[in-house]
Every structure is written in C-alpha cells, then in structure tokens.
C-alpha cells in the first residue's frame, strides 16, 4: 500500500509503536490524530512524541464542546446507563473518534485510518462501524489486532526503535478517560472477586476519607440539559468538570460492574464517573416531577434501547436518529432545579422544583387544603376492578389453594 494513514493517537505505548509498525508493515505515512475529549493531558508533548517516533504530521483537535453537546448531553437526556450502571463514557467517545478520523483522512487525502484497539473489546467495533458508515472506501487497519505481540514484546519492539516507553506502562491497569468518566480494567481487576485496590481510582476520594459533613449541590436544568450549578450559569464542559471535582471529593461515582461485551465476553470493569452519576440521578428526578407516568414508562424502555445502541457501536444509524428525536421531544418541560446531598460515596436527591411541575399539593396533601374528591374513588375502584372481579368469578384466579 502507499499513501497516508490517519491513526487515532493517544500518546501511549501501543499507538506509538503503531506509528512505526504501520510504516514497516504497510509502508504508509502516518498522520497522528489526537482528540481532546477532556482527558486533560499535555497535548504538545503528545504531538512532539508522535513526530519523534515517525509520524509525518501530528494533529490535535479540541473536541470537548462537540463531545459534550452532541454526545454526552443527548445520552444524559436519554438516561443512558448500560446494564443499568455504566454511563457509557468510553462508548460515547468512539463514534466521535470515528467521525474525526474520517474528516482528517479526507483533508489529508489518506487511503486508510487506524486505531490502537485490540481484537477483544468493544472499541474496535464502535470505531470501525462508524468509519464504515461514514466512509466505506477507507481501509481500516488495527495494528494491535494484527501484530500478535504481548505486552512485553511490544515494550521490546519500542526499545528496538527508540520509542519512549511511558512510565504509566508500569501501571497495572488499562485506562480510558474523558469528560464523562474514567474506565479502568486489567490487572487484579480481572478477578471479579477482588475488591478494587485504592490505586485504581483517580477521580474519587475513598468514601472513608471523604468529608464527615455532607455537601449540597443544586443543579439547574433547561429542557433536560444541565445549565447551572448553585444558581450559577455555566457551559457544559465547565459544569461537568466542576461537578466531577465536587462529587469526586465526596467519594461519589464509583461503579464496579461485570458487564456483557458485544464480542461475547463478560468483563469486570471499574468506572469513575462522579459528574455523570450525579447528573443522571438529578435528571431522572426532575423527569419524575415533569413527565407523566406514561411518558416515564415509555422513556425507560427507550433508555435501555438507547444505551444498548451506544454500547454496541450503532451511533450512525437511523434507529439512533429516531430514538434521539423521541428523547428530544420528551425534554420540552424538563426544566427546573434539583438539590442533592453528597456524603461519603452516596448521592441523594433531597429536593426538586420546576415551573412545569405536575406535582399538585392540593391533590397530594392529607391536610385541610385537600381538593381530591375521595368519594369518587369508590366508582373508580368499581370500574378498575371489574375485569379482575369477572375473571376471578369465572376462572377462580387468585385462590391460594390453586397453583
Ligand atoms: N468496557 C467499557 C466499554 O466498552 C470501557 C472500555 C475501556 N477501555 C479501556 N482501555 N480501559 O465501553
């Protein structure tokens, strides 16, 4: 092959080795593309490193705003939690990476794109399905899936070609970070019986060490999007960072999950997602106030579909557009404020209010202000219970002795 390949470059060992490997094995010139999705690192160092190990060009794209507005907040509005627990931080970043790989490949006139994911995970699927959807003509090369090197052999390869091995390689974990959360796997975590050691965590304080007095935070939402903390308006990136800091300091946002990967493996994953967990909780409790019972029931089903779709790499599909439209419509009145208490790893909603609240004090109260017509309940029960009574009479449903 000849020409250019755009490689999604993190600056870590695998993608650094990949630069050299792509040249050796495919004779392609490597354009290194580093995408800033809030993983706060020194991007000039990464850029220099890419060039040093042999890239012909190194590009860094700040995608934080794009990531928040087009990926994170739509997932928040959807209440997306994979298997009820994982807020999908890594998964959400992959279609964005796929899209930017394609954009840069077009600008550079590249013939291929490349990424550092292995053949066992979800990320290869998400990136490649996205690239295939957007640019079916581009070839995709996954060096880490092809080269068949162990960790040690990769380090040896790096040594042979003068590729600096980062000190972080000594870390026993494989880590992926962005604004929405931090994913940690490998090392002792591969035994699901072993409690995650404290050194696996970086964003959250151990609840044991968290402050003895609770912290309170008020989150303001407009149509399902968080826009303010404690009455102060701020942009999405700033808001997520501030909340992550605050909740993390109270030990909030740790998730320990055995999840079902798309490729058929069960894997033990640790997540730290203080802002995501708090925002998802707050958002749901505001919906409880502003959506009807039927809207909420339907939305819960959509949430499961949506989370599966994101997890399974199906971002660039019509089904996604359909679900997103439904979710967007559901957020028209999800405006208001939620107050939460953060305390030693727990986050509890303790107050909520909205100009569109469907909660009626007059209907709910047992005090003298009660406007609920209790006498009407008798007729309601008569009709509601009619089919139940009929069936019980004819078929004897519910008799204890009959099972
Ligand atoms: N299991 C998660 C997912 O599939 C996280 C993967 C994180 N990758 C990593 N290198 N730690 O979305």
Image (cartoon, grey):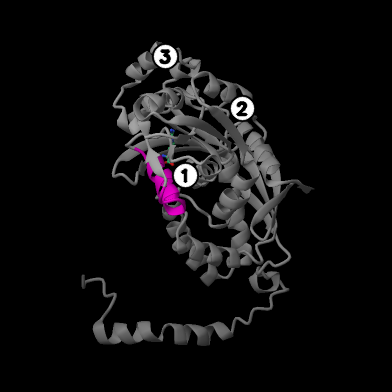
Q: Residue furthest right?
A: 232
- Depicted 61 relative to depicted 186: above or below: below
Instruction: Write the residue at 69% across / 38% down.
Output: 242
- Magenta span has 132? yes
Label 1's element? helix
- Depicted 172 relative to depicted 378: above or below: above
Q: Residue furthest front?
A: 2
Magenta span: 121-137
Disc 1 residue lies near ligand 1 with CB under 8 A:
yes
Q: Is residue 262 visible?
A: yes
Q: In this view of the protein, which residue sits in the foreground, 156 or 207?
A: 156
Label 3's element? loop
Name the residue carrying label 1.
Answer: 91
Q: In this view of the protein, which residue sits in the foreground, 288 or 389?
A: 288
Query: How far separated are the C-alphas under marks 1 and 2?
Result: 22 Å
Marked residue nearer the N-terminal end (2 or 3): 2
Tell me the tag on residue 161: 3
Name the residue carrying label 2.
Answer: 43
Q: Say few, some or many: other residues with alpha carbon within 10 Å of mark 3 (under 14 / 14 to 19 / 20 or more).
A: few
Query: How far separated are the C-alphas under marks 3 and 1?
Result: 32 Å
Q: Where residue 26 appears, x then y in whole percent?
A: 36, 30
Front of the two marks 3 and 1: 3
């Amino acid at each position: 092959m000849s020409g250019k390949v755009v490689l999604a470059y993190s600056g870590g060992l695998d993608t650094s080795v990949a630069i050299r490997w792509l040249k050796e094995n495919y004779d392609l010139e490597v354009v290194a593309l580093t995408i800033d999705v809030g993983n706060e690192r020194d991007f000039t160092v990464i850029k220099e490193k890419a060039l040093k190990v042999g890239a012909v060009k190194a590009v860094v794209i700040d995608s934080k705003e794009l990531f928040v507005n087009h990926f994170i907040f739509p997932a928040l509005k959807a209440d997306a939690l994979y298997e009820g627990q994982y807020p999908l931080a890594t998964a959400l970043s992959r279609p964005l990476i796929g899209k930017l790989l394609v954009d840069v490949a077009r600008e550079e006139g590249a013939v291929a794109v490349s990424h550092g994911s292995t053949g066992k995970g979800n990320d290869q699927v998400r990136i490649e399905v996205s690239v295939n959807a957007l640019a079916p003509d581009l070839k995709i090369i996954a060096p880490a899936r092809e080269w068949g090197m162990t960790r040690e052999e990769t380090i040896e390869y790096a040594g042979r070609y003068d590729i600096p091995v980062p000190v972080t390689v000594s870390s026993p974990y494989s880590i992926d970070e962005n604004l929405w959360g931090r994913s940690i796997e490998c090392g002792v975590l591969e035994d699901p019986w072993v409690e995650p050691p404290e050194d696996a965590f970086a964003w959250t304080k151990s609840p044991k060490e968290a402050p003895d007095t609770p912290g309170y935070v008020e989150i303001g939402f407009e149509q399902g999007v968080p826009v303010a903390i404690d009455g102060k308006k701020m942009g999405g990136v700033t808001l997520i960072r501030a909340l992550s800091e605050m909740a993390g300091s109270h030990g909030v946002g740790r998730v320990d999950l055995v999840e079902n990967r798309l490729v058929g493996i069960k894997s033990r994953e640790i997540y730290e997602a203080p802002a995501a967990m708090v925002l998802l909780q707050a958002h749901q409790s505001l919906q409880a106030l502003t959506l009807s019972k039927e809207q909420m029931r339907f939305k819960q089903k959509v949430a499961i579909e949506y989370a599966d779709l994101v997890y399974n790499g199906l971002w660039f599909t019509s089904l996604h557009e359909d679900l997103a439209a439904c979710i967007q419509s559901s957020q028209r009145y999800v405006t208001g404020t939620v107050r939460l208490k953060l305390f030693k790893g727990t986050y509890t909603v303790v107050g909520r209010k909205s100009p569109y609240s469907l909660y009626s004090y007059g209907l709910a109260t047992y005090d003298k202000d009660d406007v609920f017509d209790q006498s009407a309940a008798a007729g309601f029960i008569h009709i509601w219970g009619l089919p139940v009574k009929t069936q019980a009479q004819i078929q004897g449903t519910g008799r204890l002795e009959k099972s």
